[in-house]
Image: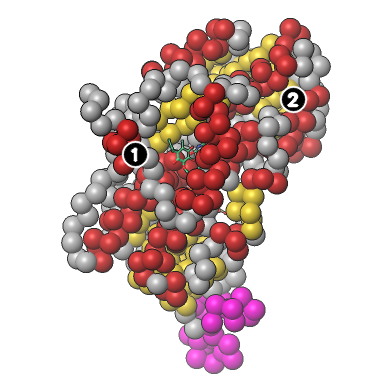
Amino acid sequence: MAALCRLRPCRSTANATMSHLHTSSHVCAKQHYKMLVLGGGSGGITMSARMKRMFGAEHVAVVEPSEMHYYQPIWTLVGAGAKTVASSGRPTASVMPSGVQWVKSKVQEINPDTNTVRTDDGTEISYEYLIVALGIQLHYEKIKGLPEGFEHPKIGSNYSIQTVEKTWKALQDFKEGNAVFSFPNTPVKCAGAPQKIMYLSDAYLRKTGKRAKANVIYNTSLPVLFGVKKYADSLWEIVKRCDLQVNLRQNLIEVRADKQEAVFENLDNPGETKVFEYEMLHVTPPMGPNLVIKGSPLADQAGWLDLNKDTLQHNKYPNVFGIGDCTSLPTIRTAAAVAAQSAVLNRTISKILKKEKPDKTYDGYTSCPLVTSYNTGILAEFDYNGQPLETFPINQAKERRTMYHLKADFMPQLYWHGLLRGLWGGPGPYRKLLHLGMK
Ligand code: FAD
Ligand code: UQ1
């Protein structure tokens, strides 16, 4: 039926008139799945692998429009020329658990009161249980002059497959002047990524003998360099050592790409703006809730998927769950967080199927491997309270070679072969083992 619906797109029954319903030659019968997963990114594929084990493949479907699945964390290194963009993507078909139905469409509407969703080709799918994993929405268009400004050189953004290679081109073409890096006035995914590319760019300019002719500038909307003091202290040391200019509470509002000018607003003095001429600009776009969720009864007031922060069950609809960047969970949005959430969510759903109370709670674990050059990194790991929750029994705020390799070489393998197969639930159990006998 799924294949038939894709061949012969049908109208939504919600839009159909009664006469249409009774006389139409082709009214698409509803598809139904015990477990429907919305989004086939990190969280969606991970949970579909786990749900296949719980429900059986034939009872699980994933709605995802994209032909390609990307390992986004590696884009930081693609933007700095240390990895190829090709290495970041694999066909969605190759990561979809075998036997699970891939509905290659966009979700347009979620109706939790009728346990249905409608896709952009008008197909209606009903479910018994729903997992929402629709990610966070990028809003380049909220910066005046973008996205069309990306048609010019000297500007890039590691946050999108379309613009990540432009970062590397701008870095290679750098001659002299300002290298400017932005952080928007919204929640973002991987809050460390906007500054990781600055450290890598600084290292590249040093390696190529251009650093003396460059001002490296980080203009961030935040009032801090990083939200967890332990790691912020280390990062400030690096900023000092490398002579990087950090300006807090500065928000990118306009790019005049033809003139190579970026306009920042002072958030502490609204209306006050400053124009930076740039030789290179890296844009981290404003981000926000997925608009399909925002327009549905599943959203909280701000538009995020309204979840219980311990169990990842929806606060109003008990057969709805969520994972990852689209959720209201008050932690930094990362794939590492998705890993830890996937183990908790698996447990929550298995308990609910047995009509028992969910008993495992998510502590907010998230992690940001902060690459600080082409061979060093800091591994920030922390919980809901911003308390460090480190896996290894060493001081992870110290720059180390091992942490660079963990990010560049080990994490992609763990992602493709562990997380996406539903076999990696985050480092929690290993942390406990590695810290045995320690205070
Ligand atoms: P995504 O993986 O983004 O998946 C969302 C999916 O939903 C997408 O496939 C999308 O096509 C689909 N979708 C959207 N709308 C619809 C719709 N209407 N219908 C159907 N499908 C839809 N994390 C780390 O742990 N460590 C890092 O070092 C790190 N670095 C990063 C660096 C960069 C530059 C970026 C961009 C991200 C980084 N991340 C990192 C973050 C990490 O990639 C995300 O947190 C993670 O992918 C979130 O998973 P998700 O499933 O919530 O969202
Ligand atoms: C992690 O589990 C994960 O998901 C696969 C990441 O995403 C790419 C990470 O960046 C990190 C750091 C973790 C945590 C894993 C370890 C071994 C500390």
Farthest residue in the front direction?
Answer: 437
Q: Quadrant of the C terminus?
A: top left
Count of picture labels: 2
Give the structural element (helix, strand or loop) at label 1: helix
Farthest residue in the left direction?
Answer: 356
Is the distance from the Cβ of mark 2 to the nearest ligand 1 atom less than 8 Å? no
Give the structural element (helix, strand or loop) at label 2: helix
List the residue tagged with mark 2. 171
List the residue tagged with mark 1. 430
Reply above or below: 99 against 197: below
Q: Is residue 204 left or right of residue 49?
A: right
Which residue sits at x=58%, y=35%?
408
Question: Callout 1, which amino acid?
Answer: Tyr
Nearest to viewer (mark 2 / mark 1): 1
Estimate the spatial distance between the alpha carbons at disc 2 and disc 1, rounded to whole Å: 38 Å
Magenta range: 1-28
**Residue 7 colored in magenta in the image:** yes
Residue 83 lies, in percent from the top left, at 68, 37
Which residue sits at x=58%, y=37%?
409
Residue 300 lies, in percent from the top left, at 36, 47
Is the distance from the Cβ of mark 1 to the nearest ligand 2 atom less than 8 Å? yes
- Residue 317: in sight, yes or no? no
Q: Is residue 14 left or right of residue 359?
A: right
Question: Callout 2, which amino acid?
Answer: Leu
Reply above or below: 48 against 58: above
